[in-house]
Image (cartoon, helix red, strand yellow):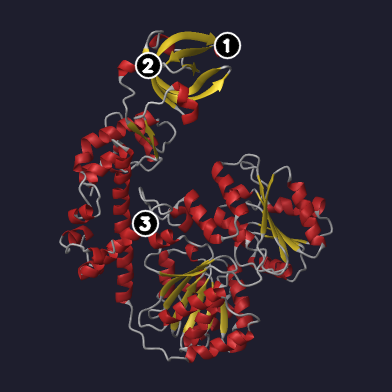
Amino acid sequence: MFVRELARSVSALKGAGRAAAARLARIGILSVADLLLHVPRDYDDRTETISFRDSIARGRANTAGTVTAHEWFGFGRMKTLKILVDDGSAEAALVCFNRPFLETKLPPGTRVRVVGRFERKFGELQSTSFEVDPEEAGGFEPVILPVYPLTEGIAQAGLRRLVRRAVDEYGSMVEDELPQAQAARLGLMKKADAIEAIHFPETRARAELARRTLAFEELFYLQLAVRRRAAARAAAAAPRPPRQAGSERRLGERLRERLPFALTADQEKVLAEIRVDMGSPRPMARLLQGDVGSGKTLVAFFAVLDAVAAGGQAALLAPTELLARQHADNAARLLEPVGIRLAFLSGNVDDAARKPLLAALESGDIDFVIGTHALFSNGVEFRELSLAVVDEQHRFGVLQRMAMSRKGRSPDLLLMSATPIPRTLALTVYGDLDVSTIRTMPEGRIPVTTHLARHGNEAKVYEFVRRELDAGGQAYFVYPLVGESESLGLRNAEAMREKLGKDIYPGKRIGLVHSRIKEAEKRETMAAFTRGELAILVATSVVEVGVDVPNASCMVIEHAERFGLAALHQLRGRVGRGTRKSYCFLVYSQKITEDARQRLMALKESNDGFLIAEEDLRIRGPGEITGVAQSGSLRLLVADPANDGELLELARSEAEAVLATDPELRSPANRTIRDVLERAPPFTESASGS
């Protein structure tokens, strides 16, 4: 626990003036406490001597030697100093670009310490990236140095000095968060010791123990908060009358009879889990996740039938009108014939239609309503909302989801996500929910083949797509921008629609959809594409969800490096939905970052949304994937859900053990968790699951 002194501005430290404080603020370091928790991303281990002779094989040198000579090469302003050093194993050259002052600092005969990366070049061993100092200066002690994430204007050496001062002046004020008995039983360090050791470890093993200590503390308190939230929700829920056993089966069997296929084993499994929840006195709070096209919506429709058969109403909330209308069309095709009374509600429904719709919803004359954010607005009332389904749930905030739940008396809540969430992240962010997963795809689904193409080579892509169009297929062309941007200079949907129509595919009918087009026009264009009246649909990412055209066989994404991995996977999922072999082309710019390259390669190498989700977690981190980073609801400073699965499981079991032994902690009363933990009975191995 940090005491008040640690809340002081980082500018209180000697050497951290206003300019440095402003630069540190750009990476979230405002206080001394922030600085102490700015953990290293790596370490520079200088405890082992690595000679010049071994430096190429080992990747670096860390050695002591004697300056033997100075040489100069080049002319005028390009004249550059070269210092020759011999460490007894070999002689190496230090090429001192923009460092002529080293001539007087390191004359021949000086004993020096050298750290750097070397290569064999121009017939000699040389380095242009090195640190060198007189050995007597003491700048190269056999230590492990922290390597921090930096910002412009802040160097490693300067940040190390600031952290060292912060640890020396304030480190002893850091109090333990975890009960002493728990920390000792789990083999963890005192927090003050962990803070010092993670920055300035004596050994790599001690650095890892310090990181484990701080990461466990983060995850433990996060899991306590998550489990308390679940307990509070269950305690606040109104009791529900038992449902009539078997009544839901009749509607469900009617739907099964109309389906031209059988549910997959995974669909049957998760439907059984949902039915157990819906039949219990406690309201369901379940996350249903599955890859694009795995059949989540059909499972939700069966749950809707169960809710209606038991005398209730159901609502399905989608983030976009395009997706909501897709669900409404599917519901009309599948559910209306078995007797379900449907309605659609969005902000674009005019007052003339809206008023009777709301009246029918309130009186119970509508069984199932599908819509957008308009569903949880004021004026929308239900007679008996018993099931709320939220699709693409990560696009809604917690308060929005709760607003939907408040439309009924403790309704069941089913959240759906077509972006699979790795187990560790699901436990971290959605630990108060039960999780159902559909991993298998419907029988007969043909995997989409993904190709990469650099800008300049896209003519081959266009020609391939032409052959698919001539064979009767359809294609999407997706762009990151609606219109021209002088600052970005990227291809955009409006300009490329014209170019594709005039220069590349003359004679082919082409439609355009993006966020600035009126909803009615967008809806008609999509309908025409679905009917096969358009060969090509040019779009932005508005087609990421809610578009199901089985005849579409090609997806071309230009400037693919501008899209996130999850968005690319979702866009690719718009093709391969029928019996045609389908293809996705990722066209990327000449200049591409390493992260973007990793995203594109991950998509090329796999169609498995779960593997892609793991890679996305590794590249972007948990907050960006779940959309909670900007809200501040998930800011893990030390723990890493991508790699701390075992530690997260331990934290979860420890949190559950605490809640099981102390009822006061389960309640939302205003008391500090730490106080309750301090007087809680000691954990046992059987209770904690250790």
First-in-chain label (3 vs 1): 1
- Mark 3 closeness class: few <14, some 14–19, many ≥20 residues within 10 Å: few
Question: Could you say where residue 357 lies in the image, as x and y percent from the top left?
Answer: 54, 82
Which numbered disc, 3 or 1, marks the residue closer to the eye?
3
Say which mark, if any, is on residue 619. none
Residue that appears at 36% across and 88% down: 241
Tag 1 and tag 2, C-beta contact below 8 Å: no
Tell me the number on the disc at residue 112: 2
From mark 3 to mark 2, how far is it between C-alphas?
45 Å
Residue drawn at x 51%, y 20% is 126
Q: Label 1: which residue?
A: 74
The local secondary structure at tag 3 comes to helix
- Tell me which corner region of the image, top left, top right, bottom left or bottom right, holds residue 488: top right
Task: Work out whether mark 1 precedes mark 2 in sequence or the reverse, and give the earlier one.
Answer: 1
Give x and y (percent) for residue 352: 59, 79
Q: Secondary structure at mark 1?
A: loop
**Could you give the CA–CA distance between mark 3 and mark 1, rounded to whole angstroms?**
57 Å
